[in-house]
Amino acid sequence: MATDPHRPQVTLRTLADELGLHVSTVSRVLHAKPDEGRRAASPATIARVRELADRLGYQPNPHATSLRTQRSNLVGVLVPRLSDLVLATIYEGIEEAASERGLSTFVTNTRDQPQLQREHTEMVLARRVDGMIFGDAHADGAFLAETAARGVPFVLVSRHVADHVAVTCDDRLGGRLAAEHLLSLGHRRLAVLAGERYASTGIDRTAGFVEVCREAGVAVRPEHVVHSPFDAAGGREAAERLLALPGPAPTAIFAANDFAAIGAMGALRDHGRQVGSDVAVVGFNDTPLAAELPVPLTSVRSPMHEMGRRALELLARLIAGEPAESERLAPTLKIRASTTG
């Protein structure tokens, strides 16, 4: 309903005076939880209050509600950078699920820098949030242990650390799927662009990949596991390092995310290698760009949007004082020309 800026604000007192009721009665009717509504007043009174509130366009005052409940209905979200399509998609899921629950979210970028993580966490807490979602957890877990000691409910998303509640893709399984696919195609000289050392995503995806290779009797040479940032520039630089190594070059590369894979594809092209025939490349996350590349990218699809939704849903449970357990969502492999030619 559109609001007339010249019309006096409709308050609980306005409704109470017109109906001849006490303000507390009107407040109980309009603010009662669904299972408390019948106890707020008689059915006839409830109907009268709601009809008048609808007709006059009553809107609750969120600041007053916050003071009554000691809740801000705010959730702070920390991510390395929202320009990353994966993180943006996860955040869309968070925001969608929050809106369904009457919660508001705001996001801040930490660039995966510990000092910024601390500073931005303090900024978020200063806004009296009801809870937090961290998409930038580091594997050492020290900062999160400090945050947990402050009693603020939080959930991790995308990455996991220690026993903190987290919603992630089953990254180890995703790495296994990539290895099984490349081994089935006959590849034995394999390399991994493993991402950042502090991120559980790269750690688990690499571990799953190497694990399957070991089970198949195929050794991934230590120098063929290259750490780099999760972006195209990092992937290109890591691939250049691989190609500069002495001895036979890898015939297949598994990158811990799609953007690193895209950077690697660019390096291979510049070195005269044909992706999909000379060298197979597998990415991770299956971002929308993967299928639209000149050589469509085989990628492990992670349920990014659903991760965001589930993280918010688990946080809502924690805020309500209910138990919540970590979840790992299943990945799937999308096979395209970057491995099949």
Image: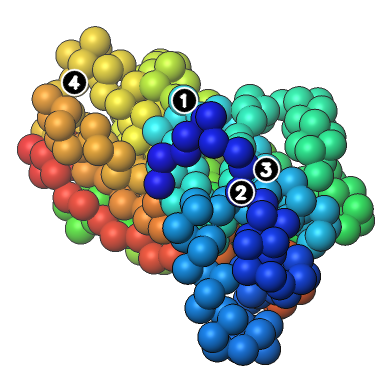
Task: Indicate the position of residue 31 as horizontal and vertical percent values.
Answer: 65, 68
Q: Which residue is mark 4?
A: 273
Q: Which marked residue is nearer to the observer: mark 4 or mark 3?
A: 3
Three-letter residue code for mark 3? Gly
Q: Is residue 204 left or right of residue 255?
A: right
Question: Which residue is labeled 2 in the image?
Answer: 10
Q: Secondary structure at mark 3?
A: strand
Mark toward the start of the polypeptide (3 vs 1)? 3
Find out whether the residues at labels 3 and 1 contact each other: C-beta distance under 8 Å: no
Packing grade of label 1 (10 A; few <14, some 14-19, many >=20) is: few
Tell me the kind of residue under disc 4.
Arg
What's the residue type where badge 2 is placed? Answer: Val
Give the mark, 4 or 1, whose residue is nearer the N terminus. Answer: 1
The 10 Å Cα crowd at callout 4, few under 14, some 14 to 19, many 20 or more, is some
Q: Which residue is mark 1?
A: 83
Tag 3 residue: 76
Q: Earlier in the sequence, mark 4 or mark 3?
A: 3
Q: Tell me how far mark 2 sits from mark 4, CA to CA.
A: 70 Å
Please tell me which residue lies in front, 206 or 290. 290
Disc nearer the start of the sequence (2/4):
2
Do labels 2 and 1 touch, CB within 8 Å? no
* N-terminal label among 3 and 2: 2
Closest to the observer: 186 or 81?
A: 81
Q: Position of residue 323 (x, y in %)?
A: 71, 77
Separation of residues labelled 3 and 2 (CA atoms): 31 Å
Label 2 packing within 10 angstroms: few (<14), some (14-19), many (20+):
some
As shown in the figure, which amino acid type bears the numbered disc 1?
Ser
Residue in the foreground of this view, choosing between 317 and 44: 44
User: Split into 4 quadrants, where in the image is the C terminus?
Assistant: top left
